[in-house]
Amino acid sequence: MEVNRKTIDDLIQDIHYLQDELEALKYVISEVPVFEKPPGQPSILEMLALIKHAQSTYYRPLVEKVSDRRKSNVEVDYDFKNSIDAKEYEEQGVEYLINKTIKHRVSFVTMLSNIPSAVWEYPVATRGPEKTLFRLMQEMVTFERGQLKSVAERVLTLQDQKANR
């Protein structure tokens, strides 16, 4: 895929849209048990906490490093999926977690919007094959969509169960 201003702007729109999905969750999340963990699966709170954790400890710091134009090759050896402690988020509550994630997303989108087109093609060495910043952000969108889809499905299931009681 060719990386140009249009594809970059479309990707930034996708990243912004995920913020809208979080906004929509705020209105239904209080009606479901967010700490409940089905066998072998994370709780709703843990899935949302992983989005926040990935954004603040992995994606944002990485984008900051890459967008520093003096560093055209950034290496990252960090697995955010295995470095999260959801307990800190449990104490703060799910509404706080969602609001904080949205707040950070607003500034993250602004930061991404200010990155010059050429920087989006800078290489990033992560676990696995090297990729561009653009590809890494596409992976972030895919990851977050998956998390939010799982959350939405769980919310709907819990709401259906509640309605059928």
Image: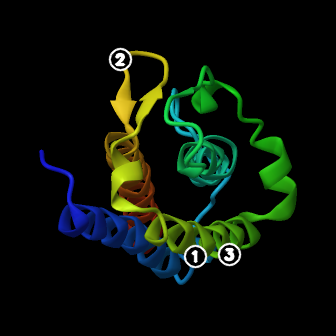
Picture layout, residue 31 above or below residue 155: below
User: Which residue type does callout 2 highlight?
Assistant: Pro
Amino acid type assigned to the residue bearing label 1 in the image? Val
Quadrant containing the C terminus in the rendered view: bottom left
Find disc 3 in the rendering and name its residue.
99
Mark in front: 3 vs 1: 1
The crowd level at tag 2 (other Cα within 10 Å; few <14, some 14-19, many 20+) is few
Report the disc number at residue 106.
Answer: 1
Q: Is residue 165 visible?
A: no
Q: Tag 3, which secondary structure? A: helix
Tell me whether the residue at label 1 lies in contact with that at label 2, contact meaning CB atoms closer than 8 angstroms. no
Q: Which quadrant holds residue 153?
A: bottom left
Residue at the far front in the pictured view: 70
Whichever of labels 2 and 3 marks the residue nearer the N terminus, that label is 3
Identify which residue is drawn at 68% across, 51% down.
56
- Left or right: residue 49 versus residue 162 is right
Residue type for callout 3: Asn
Q: Which numbered marker is on residue 129?
A: 2
Instruction: Give above or below for 46 relative to 30.
Output: above
Secondary structure at numbered mark 1: helix
Residue 141 locus on image (x, y percent): 37, 52
Q: On residue 131, which mark appears?
A: none
**Whole-Å distance between the Cαs marked 2 and 3?**
34 Å
Residue at position x 52%, y 30% from top?
Answer: 39
Point 71% across, 28% down: residue: 83
Point out residue 157 in the picture as x, y percentages from the top left corner: 38, 59
**Whole-percent x, y for residue 57 in the image:** 69, 43
Of the numbered discs 1 and 2, the one sitting upstream in the chain is: 1
Of the image marks 3 and 1, the number of the one nearer the N terminus: 3
Task: Say left or right for 62 vs 121.
Answer: right
Residue nearer the viewer, 91 or 163? 91
State the residue lying farthest toward the top.
Answer: 128
